[in-house]
């Protein structure tokens, strides 16, 4: 009996330590649960959806505007190509007009200039011939005597021919000057003919360049606006995900802690039940020990009354929902206390309830 009593006492001590450990764990769990609940209550989820929708709408508008600008730029590029093509055509026509004029001019210029060069050469030749004839006087330069075989040559015809050549040269020079003047006049007319078209085209090209530059400037602003809106949108979505993840974390933690709390509470209930049973067993062993040492009859009576009292309380709770009944020994007599009243002071209905409970308990 002593060994059994020691085993039960040691086991009860171990269970009490386990109870304390579970109670500490329960308190820690409740503290963590309270902290997690507090943190969860602090989480305020802003209305991300409104701002996200606004940014997405803004991005849609920016992309739509960009598409419009890009389309306009493409049209300007086509217009610029057309302008360049037209400019080439106008300049080609202008050059063709110049070439036709130059071809006719060069043909006339060549003929007149050739005739002028021939006249100039004739003038030089005739001038030299006349000079040579006039220098040949027939007098010997050494002795000063007239050569007997000298024949006098008349230069009248040559001089008349020279005069005619000089007049031809002047006429041809005048014709060349007139031709150059007509050339300049034709050049001016051709330039004037195409100047209006080229000026109008140049204005279109400048306007195209200015519009292109303006559109590209606006497009650059839209690109910057798009980048800014996209960055803000990405940050908002990241913040929304972060807050939702944090909220989900605390919600999962609370569920986990609630489950642990139930586990600790169940463990405490189980250990407390074990301790109660051990306490009863220890009492029984102590009574057996007392019995072994003497007083068997009193012990047996007290043990039977304790057993009957426990059973009566159990059935009272089952039948009437309370344990307010107690069987005890008052001196030399057995008495019953029901809802803080002795048996003799009970009403008839209450005595019937007590009789029913005692009958269940002694079966």
Image (spheres, rainbow, N blue to C red):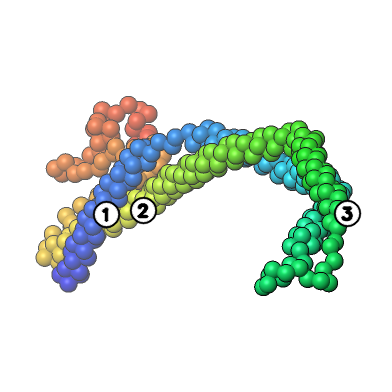
**Earlier residue among tags 1 and 3:** 1
* Quadrant (top left/top right/bottom left/bottom right) for the N terminus: bottom left
Q: Is residue 40 visible?
A: yes
Percent across and percent down for residue 18 are: 24, 60
Q: Are marks 2 and 1 in contact (CB under 8 Å)?
A: yes
Name the one closer to the observer, 213 or 63.
213
Circle 1 sits on which residue? 25
Please report the residue visible at 80 percent of the width from the left and 42 percent of the height from the top: 174
Circle 2 sits on which residue? 260
Sort mark 1 into few (<14), some (14-19) or many (20+) by Cα contacts within 10 Å.
some
Describe the element under mark 2 as helix, strand or loop: helix
Residue 84 vs 143, above or below: the answer is above
CA separation, marks 1 and 3? 150 Å
Percent across and percent down for residue 321 are: 38, 37
Q: Is residue 316 left or right of residue 116?
A: left
Describe the element under mark 1 as helix, strand or loop: helix
Name the one closer to the observer, 282 or 47.
47
Q: Quadrant of residue 293?
A: bottom left
Q: Is residue 174 left or right of residue 319?
A: right
Please report the residue visible at 66 percent of the width from the left and 34 percent of the height from the top: 207
Which dot marks residue 157?
3
Sort mark 2 into few (<14), some (14-19) or many (20+) by Cα contacts within 10 Å.
some
């Amino acid at each position: 009996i002593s060994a059994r009593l020691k085993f039960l006492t040691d086991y009860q001590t171990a269970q009490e330590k386990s109870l304390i450990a579970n109670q500490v764990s329960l308190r820690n769990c409740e503290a963590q649960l309270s902290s997690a609940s507090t943190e969860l209550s602090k989480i305020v989820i802003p209305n991300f959806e409104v701002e996200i929708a606004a940014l997405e709408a803004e991005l849609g508008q920016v992309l739509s505007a960009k598409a419009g600008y890009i389309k306009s730029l493409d049209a300007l590029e086509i217009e610029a190509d057309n302008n360049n093509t037209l400019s080439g055509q106008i300049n080609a026509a202008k050059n063709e007009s110049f070439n036709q004029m130059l071809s006719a001019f060069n043909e006339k210029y060549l003929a007149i200039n050739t005739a002028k060069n021939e006249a100039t050469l004739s003038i030089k030749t005739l001038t030299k011939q006349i000079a040579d004839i006039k220098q040949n006087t027939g007098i010997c330069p050494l002795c000063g005597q007239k050569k007997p075989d000298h024949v006098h040559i008349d230069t009248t015809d040559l001089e008349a021919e020279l005069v005619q050549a000089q007049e031809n040269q002047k006429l041809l020079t005048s014709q060349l000057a007139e031709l150059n003047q007509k050339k300049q006049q034709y050049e001016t007319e051709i330039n004037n003919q195409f100047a209006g078209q080229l000026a109008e085209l140049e204005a279109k090209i400048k306007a195209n360049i200015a519009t292109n530059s303006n559109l590209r400037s606006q497009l650059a602003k839209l690109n910057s606006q798009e980048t800014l809106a996209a960055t803000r949108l990405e940050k908002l979505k990241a913040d929304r995900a972060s807050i939702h993840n944090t909220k989900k974390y605390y919600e999962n933690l609370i569920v986990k802690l609630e489950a642990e709390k139930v586990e600790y509470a169940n463990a405490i209930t189980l250990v407390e039940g074990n301790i109660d049973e051990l306490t009863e067993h220890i009492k029984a062993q102590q009574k057996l020990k007392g019995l072994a040492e003497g007083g068997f009859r009193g012990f047996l009576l007290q043990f039977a009354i304790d057993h009957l009292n426990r059973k009566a309380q159990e059935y009272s709770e089952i039948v009437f929902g309370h344990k307010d009944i107690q069987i005890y020994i008052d001196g030399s007599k057995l008495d019953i206390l029901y809802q803080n009243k002795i048996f003799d002071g009970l009403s008839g209905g209450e005595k019937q309830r007590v009789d029913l409970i005692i009958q269940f308990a002694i079966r």
